[in-house]
Image (cartoon, rainbow, N blue to C red):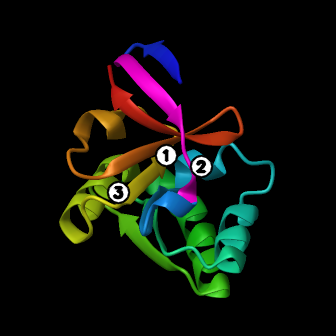
Amino acid sequence: MAVKKTKKGRFVLRPASLADFQRLYVDVFSIAASLAYPEELFKSAAEAGIDAVFVIDAWHESHIPLARRYLEHCRRYGLECRLSEQKPAEQYAVELCEAECGSGCAVVTRDYDAALKARRCAVLLFWRGGFWLVSPA
């Protein structure tokens, strides 16, 4: 367990496993930005057979070139992707998770805002090379 203090507040982080959740809602821009090869996110999810929805930022024109590339990866690997056209992907991922799945499912991100918005879904933060269940302290 770890306690992390950020500009957004204090958060409790506990080690977690993706396998503990029936479905994941992945904030693609956030997670892919932390990887040397962003395509690995899609390839490894497909190979592992993870039930996931990849949520891609597309709410600003500056996102579009990268969003297109990520959509192509989704098609190539047969993954479900959704564009977040009106708000940041971490917010839309929480909304989707809460509406479609609820408890037993999780949002995967690097953004603490998701933990502040989620009520029924868990939030997994990708931090220090692993996944951590995060909640406001």
Q: Earlier in the sequence, mark 2 or mark 1?
A: 2
Residue 128 sits above or below residue 44 on the image = above
Q: Is residue 61 visible?
A: yes
Q: In whole angstroms, how far apart are the C-alphas of marks 2 and 1?
A: 6 Å
Q: Residue at x 66, y 83 (%)?
A: 77
Task: Please tell me the numbered disc located at residue 31.
Answer: 2
Residue type, mark 2 in image: Ile
Whole-percent x, y for residue 99 in the image: 19, 65
* Identity, as a three-letter code, of the amino acid under mark 1: Thr
In the rendered image, residue 26, in percent from the top left (x then y), is placed at 48, 58
Q: Does label 3 or label 1 sit earlier along the sequence?
A: 3
Residue 110: x %, y % from top left: 52, 39
Residue ID for mark 3: 93
Amino acid type for the residue under numbered disc 3: Ala
Secondary structure, mark 2, is helix
Is there CB contact under 8 Å for labels 3 and 1? yes
Foreground of the two, 28 or 58: 28
Q: Which of 108 and 120 is in front in this view?
A: 120
Element at label 1: strand
Using the image as rendered, state which of residue 73 and residue 49 is in the foreground: 49
CB atoms at circles 2 and 1 under 8 Å apart?
A: yes
What's the residue at 50%, 51% (across, down)?
62
Residue 94's place in the image compared with 97, above or below, is above
Whether residue 60 is visible here, answered yes or no, is no
Image: magenta residue range:
8-18
Q: Counting residues from the N terminus, which is met first, the one under dot 2 or under dot 3? A: 2
Relative placement, left or right, of 13 versus 39 is: left
From the image, tell me which residue sits under label 1: 109
- Which residue is depicted at the point 26% across and 56% down? 86
